[in-house]
Amino acid sequence: MIKSYLKIAWRNLWRNKSFSFLNISGLAIGIAAASLIIVWLLNEVSYDRFHTNANRIYNVYNADVHEGKTWCWNTTPKVMAQAIQQDYPEVETVVRVNWPQPLLFTIGDKKLKATGHFVDSGFLKMFSFPLIKGNANTVLNNNYSIVITESLSKKLFGNEEAVGKTFLVDNQDNFTVTGVLKDIPTNTQFDFEYLIPWSYMRTKGWDDEFWGNNSTNTFVQLKKETTLASITPKIKTLRSKYDKESPKMETFLYPISRSYLYGKFDNGKESGGRIETIRLFAIIAIFIILIACINFMNLSTARSEKRAKEVGIRKVVGAEKKSLIGQFLGESILISFIAGVFALIIISISLPYFADLVQKKLSINYSDYRFWLAGVGVILFTGLLAGSYPALYLSGFKPVAVLKGTFKKVNALVTPRKVLVVTQFAFAIILIIGTIIVRQQLLNAQDRQTGYSKDNLVFSFLEGDMEKNYPLIKNELLSNGIATSVTKTSAPITEGWSNTWGFEWQGKDPNDKTVIDRYCADDDICKTAGLQIIKGRDIDLDKYPTDSFAMLLNESAVKHMKFTEPLGQIILDNGKKWHVVGVVKDFILKSPYHPIEPMIIEGAAGWFNVVQLKFNTVKSTRENLAAAETIFKKYNPSYPFEYKFVDEQYAKKFDNEKRTGKLAGLFAFLTIFISCLGLFGLASYMAETRIKEIGVRKVLGASVFSITSMLSKDFLTLVIIART
Amino acid sequence: MIKITGLEKYYRTEEVETIALNKLTIDVKEGEFVAVMGPSGCGKSTLLNILGLLDDPDGGSFVFNGIEVAGFNERKRADLRKKNIGFVFQSFNLIDELTVFENVELPLIYNNVKATDRKKRVEEVLDNLKIMHRRNHYPQQLSGGQQQRVAVARAVVNNPKLILADEPTGNLDSSNGNEVMQLLTELNEKGTTIVMVTHSEHDARYSHRIIRMLDGHAVTENILI
């Protein structure tokens, strides 16, 4: 019987090629689009779940209350790890991981930069990053040992054996390779090319024991028998024993498997995070499949008159409704299967482009049986969903009516088919509106005045001898006419790296714990970055030697500090006294989507990571860069000259939103495309069934225009209903 | 074989109620060949649909082979139908997407006959009806007479006890029509009961008995043999 069904299904497909084409292409595009989304989402939800002990690994978080609101963050004091290891027998291992650190690796003439972490020696035992060479228990035991990834090993040593080789790191110490790691997967929050033992930090004096310095990430692995609930109340009060400054600050453990998707806190509670995007796109994937299925339902039921006779005959010769339902479902599964094959082709072609769009390394493991299982699942699901309504509809025909020719298609005001078309376009329109909203927000943020001049502004991180030779570098850049202004700062102008609620000024409310952004700039910051001075003057070390301790405030800071006369005010930061010399107009330091926060700029006595150059426009940017490179190389020969344009960095702030916008746009387009395929099929089918009517009308003198409008009217009405 | 007593059937639309069968009472014995005649709208097709278990009566009794079937649900009716009844229609009603062989095979499939047995039986019937050479053609490739032969083949392939024919020669010329009537007569001679609705006095003469209907009643009966 199944053979007979398949035969009929196949012959039907073959005879009605245009119908089959529309049906299959709609479904194939739908399945492909939804599958791409699924592949991406599966990658997202698998973040850091592959570690063997993933369910026992936790990130240590702080929770602190300011102005009645609970703030949660995961940078801890370096010394906290020891305290946890000592005081909590429930904990198996504690590992610290510092911020990603770009370091210069030198082997003979070869110099290259790589980013990695300083980590405690238990890192590779806690996290499942497999070693190709070396033993996870010992590779990080020596102060000067280094573990590198396979691709870094290739870059450094080609195909030679890396283990045992020694090279110079950051022009300071020689390190010996003790292990080579398989390249780390993309579905982890870690991104590193090398690992250096934490003990090296100690030899350099970079480790510290201040409880006030929340500066590193701490991870714990609980013992097998320990539950999170049992340790939570104990670890909560960890700081009360050690931290004299903030004894009330709470400590809690947060599962590493949750942190990528859910690790966003609002007032002490999880508040979404990436899971929101995941949910959104999961819904979009379902929408797209649904729309493709609706196409199928509409086209199949529209052809019902053609199939009606067959149904009637089959019933007459003894078919039960059940077996007819089976037949029609079989047909839709066959179509869905063919669509699935085409979808697979579309997926394998478009996956690299899609991966590029979502900025993830996505791949499909075709040798994994689970992939094929999921594929068959999707095909069956789509086939059953798409075939359900047509199967019930077609199998319900009464043979008497059908075979005696009294069977008439329903022409009611509201038919299920019309409802389906409306639903389909309603989905499409929801997606379009979503796309427009994302785009509008993006445009609003992009149109916002930054408050500084991004043009010809370039920055470079202070490395090697740059800080030492800074005066010479600055002098040559200025005197050679390469730059019109040069300033050392604590961070790029597009980023805020530091803030505190610890500033003190006259008249400050002792309970005021408002966080104020802290930025440092040695000299001429307003000139270099094009900040607008509202009151007072720029920091100017040449004219005013005391400007080492000069300070600028932004408008919001003046307002917050309630200064009627800000100039000359003294502000204390960690015991240092700064005097205010100027007020600048608010500018966007961090997010273009958020309001500007109060901010202060400290003078030359601050700390510096970046040098910013305002290029001279007399020469071309290319000439300026070439000349600047010569000067930087001269004073900092061990390091390559690396620079970034501020306008490009600023544009990156919109990358996420742009990506979401592009994705939403893409899927909105596909949705409409699929819907239109369906509508086209439906319309051409209607025209075909009304061919006699059209003929009669033409004979009676109807114009082509009146017939076209007659045929279009029905569908336009449905699209308009969907819109409203 | 068939005993109908006081059978009623109404058709309702929003405006009017039409009485198709009005307390109709007839008997058909096993092995009989009965023709039902009457003007359009007299209820003869309705009667045939009820006899074929394609439609439900609104009242009265219908005993088929000693079983009261008037209240059967769709599943039970389908089961009884596929085992006992074959149909021949005026417009042939073959499935366009299936070949001659596959069309004839269909009732056997729904009766769960094994594939090898099916092949044997279909070939036997096609051979008997002299359309074996057309077994792989599609209905559109056949003449009207040939299509009706296929339809007859399909009706008899399952060895039904009863064949219901609804104006079987209506779409055929006289020579093809006569051939089909000849076929039905032969089947009847072999023991199959036949009830045929027809407008043609010529065709009716092939039967044993003519039931004439008017407004849902059987008005006269002519016994021909």
Image (tube, coloured by chain):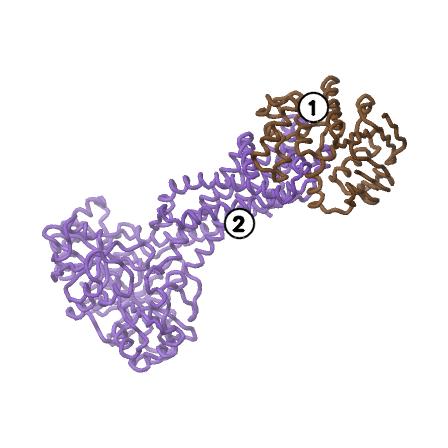
Chain colours: A purple, B brown
Amino acid type of the residue that numbered disc 1 sits on in the rendered structure: Gly
Q: Which mark is residue A430?
A: 2
Front position in the image: B177 or A158 = B177
Q: Hey, which quadrant is residue A685 in on the image? A: top right
Give the spatial CA distance, label 2 vs label 1.
42 Å
Q: In the visual, does A109 lie left or right of A708? A: left
Residue B182 location (% of width, % of height): 74, 22
One can see residue B33 in this view: yes
Residue furthest toward the left? A108
Q: Position of residue B195 (x, y in %)?
A: 78, 31
Name the quadrant containing residue B124.
Answer: top right
Chain under disc 1: A
**Residue A488, x across and y down, in percent:** 21, 60
* Most foreground residue, A551 or A543: A551
Residue A391's place in the image compared with A245, above or below, is above
Q: Which mark is residue A701?
A: 1
Work out whether mark 2 precedes mark 1 in sequence or the reverse, and give the earlier one.
Answer: 2
Which residue is the extreme one toward the top? B175
Is disc 1 placed on a helix, strand or loop? loop
Left or right for A129, reference A402: left
- Residue A189 lies, with reference to residue B221, above or below; the image says below
Q: Are marks 2 and 1 on the same chain?
A: yes
Three-letter amino acid code of the residue under disc 2: Ile
Res A662 visible: no
Q: Tell which subunit mark 2 falls on.
A: A
Marker disc for residue A680:
none
Above or below, comparing residue A237 to residue B140 in the picture: below
Q: Closest to the observer: A142 or A314?
A: A314
Q: Secondary structure at mark 2?
A: helix
